[in-house]
Amino acid sequence: MFERVSAAPADPILGLTEAFKADDRPNKINLGVGIYKNEAGQTPVLATVKMAEKRLLENEATKSYLSIEGNPAYGKEVQKLLFGADSEIVASQRGFTAQSPGGTGALHNAAEFAYNHLGVRTVWVSNPTWANHGNIFKALGLEVKAYDYYNAETKDLDFDAMLTSLEQVAEGDLVLFHGCCHNPTGIDPTQAQWEQLATLTAAKKALPLFDFAYQGFATGVEEDAAGLRIFAKQIKELLVASSFSKNFGLYNERVGAFTLVAADKEQGATAFSQVKAGIRANYSNPPSHGAAVVTTILQDAELKAQWVAEVAEMRERIKEMRDLFVATLAAKGATGDYSFIQRQNGMFSFSGLSKEQVQTLKEQHGVYIVGSGRISVAGMTKDNMEALCAAIAAVV
Ligand code: PLP
């Protein structure tokens, strides 16, 4: 039967990494996939992760299965991180968390629950958004609609257009928001705008789904949850997909969390029983190691403080690269004003480079950027900056 199957298109982001690996030019630069790199161009294991792993290795007594939703201590720590340690949601136990295989798995958990048990058929995502959102939702049978987000001229959030398109949301639709560090634009709503978005979402009786993959990469671990916490104050029911791939550097351990917040503990427990039934049929129960590392760090005040500092170090290095990138582009005589890059949050910069310019950068200069013009700033170093900016200046 297999001869009838046609080949799937290469993943636009992971396919780029394959092409990069196959390129034998020594000075090639990969600014495609969103992976943090340090000044030496490496993606090291965080010191706190190493410490937690050492403890786990010494103390781990069994490899027996976890429960369907994973370790309850992990769920509690995730909720404290999302809503604050003294949050009413944590105190009243109306939040329910499943340990999931990465943020992707958490988004799948959320969409599956919404489709199968809430009758949701439409999900709204920003235009543009992370390339995999469409894949995840469409695979589950949801129709994906886009709301306006980005103004290519001002290189800023088009908030009026965003509100106008969200006016089209129907009761019971799912609306996806990026918790912070919007991927790919790096532009987040302000607190006042989050308030307005929450009011509108509540008025539309839509279900918000927060995709929270970069907590700590914009301003700080607590600060970055401001939008979500504003929503949680105004809206009693919401869903969150957390990823710890970036902020704990646990990419290949697949650590994420799906959190369901209900109006009260009883309703939440009933709804969550269906989430668990879905997980049982899907991957039965989650992998343990990565979440055990996260739990070990978050439960220990000293390790947690050290982790917060490690996240700050990653965040600050990216900010430093943004400044240096803008300055070096100017020094190389690149046409245009690039100061908007300093206003963006997180790993990515939506550069405004065209598809053709991206293609030329790859072919003639060995610089790999996603077709949308999204640049992973985390892939820049002081060493590759001159060559990178000279190449960009040559194509713009
Ligand atoms: N959501 C967004 C916006 C992302 O950028 C990513 C990863 O790149 C994810 C979710 C998924 O993260 P994970 O690798 O944990 O599945």
Image (spheres, rainbow, N blue to C red):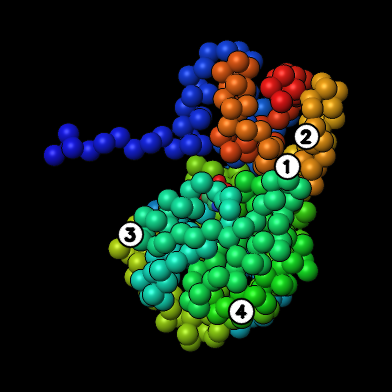
Q: Quadrant of the N terminus?
A: top left
Q: Quadrant of the C terminus?
A: top right
Q: Position of residue 302 (x, y in %)?
A: 74, 55
Residue at image point 42% right, 82% down:
270
Looking at marks 3 and 4 on the same chain, the residue that comes earlier in the sequence is marked by: 4
Q: Is mark 3 within 8 Å of ligand 1?
A: no
How far apart are the alpha carbons under marks 2 and 1?
11 Å
Q: Position of residue 320 (x, y in %)?
A: 81, 37
- Residue at mark 3: 282
Whether pointer 4 and pointer 1 mark residues with C-beta atoms closer than 8 Å, the reply is no
- Residue at mark 4: 202
- Amino acid tagged 4: Ala
Q: Position of residue 194 (x, y in %)?
A: 71, 68
Q: Give me the disc on residue 321.
A: 2
Q: Residue furthest left?
A: 1
Q: Give me the disc on residue 314.
A: 1
